[in-house]
Amino acid sequence: MAYSLLKQLHLTTLVVTLALFVLRGAWMMAESPRLHIRWVRIVPHLNDSLLLASGISLAVLTRQYPLVNGWLTAKFFALILYIVLGTIALKRGRTRSQRIAAWIAALLVFGHMAAVAIARDPVPFIR
């Protein structure tokens, strides 16, 4: 029961994270002032915190850990790369083209993380 609820929370927050990242990326490309609205700066961080907490809880519950299980290690390092690219895309990129390139790269990394999670294989596209 706890596992299925945690997994549902994890998947729901995952979808919300992706939707908000795509939306904020579109607003970034359009140079929209909506990026500076208070909820846009707060809600993604709250959701991402729930996503991370549910992911850690699932790892503990299933006794699968990064640096022990290959697929989870791949997901862990991809998550770090996704966070760095997302930060460049939405905040730290010096030029619009840098931010757009980082946003696209972050979406590709996100897709890789999803494929790793589904296949439970660190290199899901090779095997």
Image (cartoon, rainbow, N blue to C red):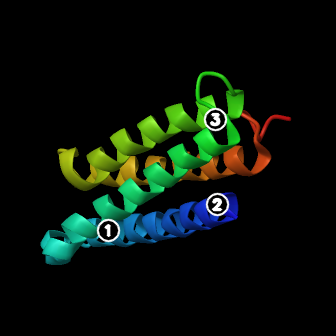
- Expressed as whole percent of the image width and height from the top left, the position of residue 74 reads 61, 32
In this picture, is 33 found above or below 29? below
- Expressed as whole percent of the image width and height from the top left, the position of residue 45 reads 29, 59
Sequence-earlier tag: 3 or 1: 1
Mark 2 is on which residue type?
A: Ala
The residue lying at 76 percent from left, 40 percent from top is 124
Residue at mark 2 to residue at mark 3: CA–CA distance: 20 Å
Q: Is residue 68 left or right of residue 56?
A: right
As drawn, the residue found furthest toward the top would be: 67
Badge 1 marks a residue whose secondary structure is helix
Q: Is residue 101 left or right of residue 124?
A: left
- Numbered disc in front, either 2 or 3: 2
In this picture, is 111 found above or below 43? above
| Towards the viewer: 10 or 75 | 10
Sequence-earlier tag: 1 or 2: 2
Q: Which residue is mark 2?
A: 2
Mark 1 is on which residue type?
A: Arg
The residue lying at 45 percent from left, 71 percent from top is 19
- Expressed as whole percent of the image width and height from the top left, the position of residue 50 reads 42, 59
Q: Which residue is mark 1?
A: 24
Quarter that holds the C terminus: top right
Pointer 2 local density, CA inside 10 Å: few below 14, some 14–19, many at least 20: few
Q: Which residue is mark 3?
A: 72
